[in-house]
Image (tube, grey):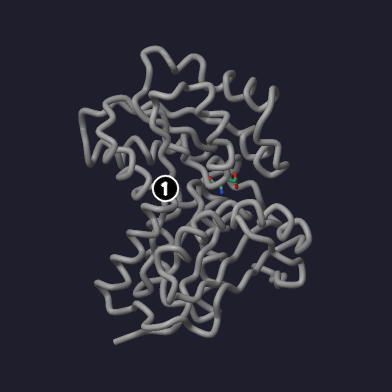
Amino acid sequence: MADPRPIGVFDSGVGGLSVVAALEAALPAESIVYLGDTARLPYGTKSPQTVERYALSAARALVAEGVKMVVIACNTASAVALDAVRRALAPVPVVGVVEPGAAAAVATGARRVLVLATEGTIRGGAYERAIAHMAPDVEVVGVACPLFVALAEEGWTCGEIPVQIARHYLQAHLSPRPDAIVLGCTHFPLLSGVVAEVAGPAVRLVDSAETTARRISAELHATGLAAARRGSGGLVLLATDGAERFARVGSRFLARPIGARDVRIVNLP
Ligand code: DGL
């Protein structure tokens, strides 16, 4: 049975639009409602209790929009709040990005993996646990790279300063050389060029967007929730603050222009 209701996707800001781009490519029949909690960004420096509260209110706002599934397209919220959001929303299915990202890293066959993420994601050790569950022999080293979020937001993603910052974060972890680096934050795919420059060509970079899209596709089909043909909704964009900034910065993550008038501002409790 086809289900035309939209998929709900949220992130602390615009970074999760990279997951939306992968979803649109993998599932062109699906409509999407995206919520960027820009008023409360960043999540990555906040306590787990605060991130859980924010994630619950964002997820509930999407359910109120009539979505059939919620995707937590934020590594920090997936790392600390996935179980709480699943419990609160049941029976609505909830998919996070950490487990698909971990699966993508394991699929490279890497024996030594660096995970680059926010402080909140690294502190909780979610990637270490997810990778250990799938491949106990893989060595995982987590590196918090908080300045990468600001660089990606600024669009300052190449040149001397971003390379120096990447070197500062990575240098101590490049010997012995990792086989794979997980870009474990929705903002970091924009910095893949500088990370690759510092890490060298032999290191595989892993981004969870495509793996997450495949996971969502499998879950929609397994549960009979997939849409049959393109719904009338397309992509609806919601933000909790700053439509103009959301449109300007978000265009880079979605890889197509967004107009500020296409962004509806909502208030979350
Ligand atoms: N969306 C966050 C993540 O993927 C990065 C930005 C933030 O700190 O809120 O971890």
Relative to 11, say whether 163 is above or below.
above
- Expressed as whole percent of the image width and height from the top left, the position of residue 97 reads 42, 52
Q: Where in the figure is residue 221, as x and y percent of width and height? A: 28, 73
Q: Residue 216 appears in which quarter of the rendering?
A: bottom left
Residue 262 lies left or right of residue 229; in this view the side is right
111 vs 6, left or right, is: left
The answer to whether residue 221 is left or right of residue 11 is left
Q: Quadrant of the N terminus?
A: bottom left
Residue at the spot 56% in from the left edge and 43% down from the top edge: 47
Disc 1: CA contacts within 10 A as few (<14), some (14-19) or many (>=20) = many
* Most foreground residue, 116 or 207: 207
Q: Indicate if the residue with disc 1 has its beta carbon within 8 Å of ligand 1.
A: no
Is 55 positioned to the left or the right of 174 in the image?
Answer: right
Image height check: is 112 above or below 215?
Answer: above
Q: Quadrant of the C terminus?
A: bottom right
Judging by the rendered image, the residue that carries numbered circle 1 is 208
Q: Amino acid under label 1?
A: Ser
Query: Count of labels shown?
Result: 1
Residue 201 percent coordinates (x, y) = 43, 24
Dot 1 lies on which element?
helix
Q: Position of residue 94 (x, y in %)?
A: 39, 65
Of 120 and 174, nearer the camera is 174
Residue sitting at 72 percent across and 60 percent down? 247
Residue at 57%, 72% in the rendered image: 235
